[in-house]
Image: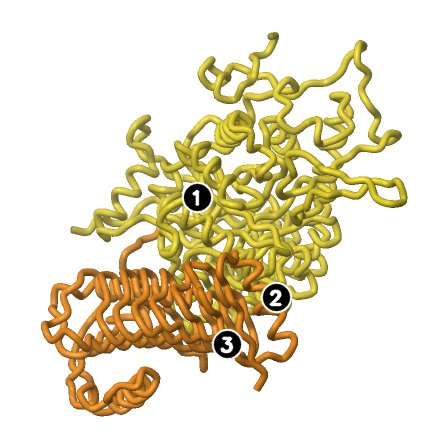
Chain colours: A yellow, B orange
């Protein structure tokens, strides 16, 4: 049966009094929304994804985009999206895929937490005048230090230290693979973190030669497809991350469609051009926590114990117990990816319904590790839905050592969160491999935006700490006394181990 | 040729691998490991041209991520020998465990007898790199699952009944599997198809039969004369039709 056309998602209009027929909208839209006629621009609103590239390039502010111009009969249960999803599945019989992160209407816990500041009795600290220690070390910390006296009457450290990553700010950029995003996008972010003194992940797409200059700031990923993984790759990275799961799609693997596997992507992933790059749901050499330990140790052994090894999991119901297992596996850090984590493509049923938010996950992981006396064995990296410096401060108060940002870094390069990454036509040159689109993103300019964002958040973090009378990030970590819950229920407050406002 | 022998009695794998790496730096080209008993990660991430003879039973992930060396095991091997191996050769005079040649991307693994579950899982190939897993005996279920490239050959030397293990090559989207004799239809996983080998394919196969027979000092003739089934992907994109966009 033919269900017929649905209302267009967006209505695009051009103010004829403003338009000077320069044609930039036509040139800039990869989705074919605009076409130049002799004396006007013809619009096909149905093609619009609201990426705003046309608006950003229009010299006369002539373009207007309206979302959902045509109403369905309103209904609180059978929303527009629900109805349209049913139409699509009734037509196709297939699994629905979508881009970007969780689009479900869940309350955001971050927005129900407020931070503390000093008044009168304990003076706040002025970060302009006083040093603020934001340096963060990621990796195992010894439980205790042993020293011995040497012949000179001095002390020698006897305890053997394991390698740590030194971060000048607790903000890193998470794993977005070459293939999912463009090389120019990766280069811009890699240059930004290398200048800041932070790190970014490669994702499961190998390490392109163009990133070798930044390899000391790159964390290389080993995921279930083992794409691009060889001993050269492992040795180049500053650290190695085993990806078990991803917040946007916990429990399932990834499929990079063949059309995104161009010559260069095929080279770094080490698979034939045009072939699907399929990462299975589990690692097929990890069916237990003992197997995970074996993979952690094998990667350490292969790199002669010079690299910290992280393990990334999606935040799921039992995240605390799983993290406790990981802490005992020899891993140096555990990355927890919350259910708001971004993605290029994920089944929407997973994206919107599986997993738990990062705030609750980090609080319970930190509590569990402390309770078991193994918090020093691993650093905790929080990821998935970190939108602003306040989120960074709050998640550190809840027990994280540092954060990964993803979508925020993409937005810094122009991304408008249109959620159409899976089309491979990203008009900003980010989530695409088409040379003419990739060339729109100049890494030598875009890196400044990414660096600006992280610098600004770092400054804000220092200000927040100063206001709270804290001069070292160490004193903020797990410091729940500096948080209060605003209209959170008692069970949530108990999980977060945070008092309500006024208490 | 410079040779050394290392007695691995009661030795942990890290000092053992350190000794191996040190020997290679000193120009040793043949290392004999005696009294190996379950040490994991032997040759893990090892590069270069060296021959390692292993006496005893090596632990898991033998030759993992290895690029170049050749390892010969006089005994059985634990799980995942050749895991994500890049170049070189592993010869096992016995059987090996689960996930043998897991995610292997280059080189060769020869197993004289049987392998466990998930053999050759997610093997892949790129340009001139085409890994090969040659099994003299039999394999348990999920052989060649998710295979993205490379070659698996299984001779089933002690078995004449059709191959009957579930999940054969399920999700395969590259590479090929040759099995001596017949394969029961129900064993084939999603995305896999089977047919008898062609004359051209048999030529390639014969080369490996001779190599296998030479490596293990066996008579190649029964294998050369036998008939084979080829299992290959139906499509390079087995999941392309599974999804629709939001």
At 71% from the left and 54% from the top, the residue drawn is A194
| Left or right: B23 as drawn, with respect to A32 | right
Indicate the secondary structure of the residue bearing disc 2.
loop
The mark tally for this picture is 3
Specify the subunit that label 2 lies on: A
Task: Indicate the position of residue B53 as horizontal and vertical percent values.
Answer: 45, 75
Q: Which mark is residue A439?
A: 2
Task: Indicate the position of residue B130 as horizontal and vertical percent values.
Answer: 40, 78
Q: Give the foreground label among 1 and 3.
A: 3
Residues at discs 1 and 3 both on one chain: no
Query: Of A503 and A369, which appears nearest the observer?
Result: A369
Tell me the residue that label 3 is attached to: B69
| Left or right: B115 as drawn, with respect to B222 | right
User: Could you classify mark 3 by the number of other residues whose Cα lies within 10 Å: few (under 14), some (14-19), or many (20 or more)?
Assistant: many
| Left or right: A210 as drawn, with respect to B122 | right
Specify the subunit that label 3 lies on: B
**Sequence-earlier tag: 1 or 2:** 1
Q: Which mark is residue A248?
A: 1
At 57% from the left and 13% from the top, the residue drawn is A499
Q: Is residue A23 visible?
A: no
A118 to A380, vertically: above or below:
above
CA gap, disc 1 to disc 2?
28 Å
CA gap, disc 2 to disc 3?
42 Å
Specify the quadrant of the image occupied by residue A374. top right
CA gap, disc 1 to disc 3?
40 Å
Task: Indicate the position of residue A331 as horizontal and vertical percent values.
Answer: 54, 46
Specify the subunit that label 1 lies on: A
A455 to A203, vertically: above or below:
above
């Amino acid at each position: 049966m033919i269900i017929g056309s649905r209302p267009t998602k967006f209505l695009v209009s051009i103010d004829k009094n403003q338009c000077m027929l320069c044609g930039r909208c036509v040139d800039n839209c990869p989705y074919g929304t605009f076409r130049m006629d002799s004396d006007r621009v013809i619009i096909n609103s149905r093609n619009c994804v609201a990426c705003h590239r046309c608006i950003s390039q229009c010299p006369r502010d002539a373009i207007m985009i309206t979302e959902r111009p045509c109403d369905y009969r309103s209904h609180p249960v059978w929303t527009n999206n629900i109805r349209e999803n049913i139409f699509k599945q009734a037509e196709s019989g297939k699994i629905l895929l979508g881009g970007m992160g969780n689009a479900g209407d869940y309350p955001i816990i971050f927005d129900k937490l407020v931070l503390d500041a000093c008044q009168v009795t304990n003076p706040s600290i002025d970060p302009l005048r006083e040093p603020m220690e934001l340096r963060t070390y990621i990796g195992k910390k010894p439980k205790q230090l042993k020293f011995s006296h040497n012949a000179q009457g001095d002390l020698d450290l006897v305890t053997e230290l394991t390698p740590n990553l030194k971060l000048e700010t607790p903000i890193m950029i998470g794993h977005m693979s070459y293939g999912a995003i463009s090389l120019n996008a990766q280069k811009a972010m890699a240059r930004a973190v290398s200048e800041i003194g932070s790190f970014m992940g490669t994702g499961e797409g190998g390490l392109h030669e163009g990133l070798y200059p930044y390899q000391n700031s790159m964390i290389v990923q080993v995921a279930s497809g083992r794409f691009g993984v060889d001993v050269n790759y492992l040795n180049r990275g500053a650290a190695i991350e085993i990806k078990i799961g991803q917040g946007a799609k916990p429990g399932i693997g990834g499929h990079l469609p063949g059309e995104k596997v161009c010559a260069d992507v095929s080279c770094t992933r080490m698979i034939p051009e045009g072939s699907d790059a399929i990462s299975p749901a589990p690692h097929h050499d990890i069916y237990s926590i003992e197997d995970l330990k074996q993979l952690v140790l094998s990667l350490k052994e292969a790199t002669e114990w010079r690299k910290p090894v992280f393990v990334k999991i999606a935040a799921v119901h039992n995240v605390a117990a799983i993290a406790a297992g990981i802490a005992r596996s020899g891993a140096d850090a555990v990355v927890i990816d919350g259910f708001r984590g971004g993605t290029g493509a994920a089944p929407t049923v997973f994206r919107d319904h599986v997993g738990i938010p990062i705030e609750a996950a980090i609080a319970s992981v930190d509590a569990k590790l402390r309770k078991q006396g193994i918090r020093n064995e691993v650093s905790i990296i929080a990821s998935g839905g970190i939108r602003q410096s306040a989120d960074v401060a709050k998640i550190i108060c809840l027990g994280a050592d540092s954060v990964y940002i993803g979508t925020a870094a993409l937005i810094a390069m122009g991304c408008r969160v249109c959620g159409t990454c899976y089309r491979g036509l990203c008009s900003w040159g980010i989530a695409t491999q088409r040379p003419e689109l990739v060339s729109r993103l100049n890494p030598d300019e875009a890196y400044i935006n990414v660096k600006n964002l992280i610098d600004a958040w770092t400054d804000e973090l220092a200000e927040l700490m100063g206001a709270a009378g804290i001069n070292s990030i160490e004193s903020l970590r797990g410091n729940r006394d500096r948080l209060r819950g605003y209209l959170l229920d008692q069970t949530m407050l108990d999980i977060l181990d945070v008092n309500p406002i006024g208490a | 040729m410079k040779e050394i022998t290392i007695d691995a009695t009661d030795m942990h794998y890290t000092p053992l691998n350190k000794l191996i790496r040190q020997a290679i730096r000193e120009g040793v080209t043949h290392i004999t490991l005696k009294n190996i008993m379950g040490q994991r990660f032997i040759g893990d991430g090892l590069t270069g041209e060296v021959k390692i003879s292993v006496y005893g039973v090596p632990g898991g992930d033998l030759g993992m991520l290895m690029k170049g060396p050749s390892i010969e095991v006089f005994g059985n091997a634990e799980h995942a020998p050749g895991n994500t191996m890049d170049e070189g050769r592993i010869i096992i005079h016995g059987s090996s465990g689960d996930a043998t040649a897991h995610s292997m991307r280059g080189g060769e693994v020869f197993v004289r007898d049987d392998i466990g579950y998930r053999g050759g899982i997610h093997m892949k190939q790129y340009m001139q790199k085409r890994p090969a897993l040659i099994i003299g005996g039999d394999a348990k279920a999920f052989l060649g699952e998710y295979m993205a490239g490379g070659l698996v050959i299984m001779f089933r030397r002690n078995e004449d009944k059709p191959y009957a293990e579930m999940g054969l090559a399920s999700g395969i989207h590259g590479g090929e599997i040759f099995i001596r004799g017949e394969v029961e239809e129900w064993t084939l996983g999603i995305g896999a198809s089977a047919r008898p080998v062609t004359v051209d394919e048999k030529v390639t196969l014969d080369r490996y039969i001779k190599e296998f027979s030479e490596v293990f000092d066996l008579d190649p003739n029964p294998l050369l004369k036998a008939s084979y089934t080829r299992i290959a992907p139906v499509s390079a994109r087995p999941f392309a039709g599974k999804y629709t966009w939001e």
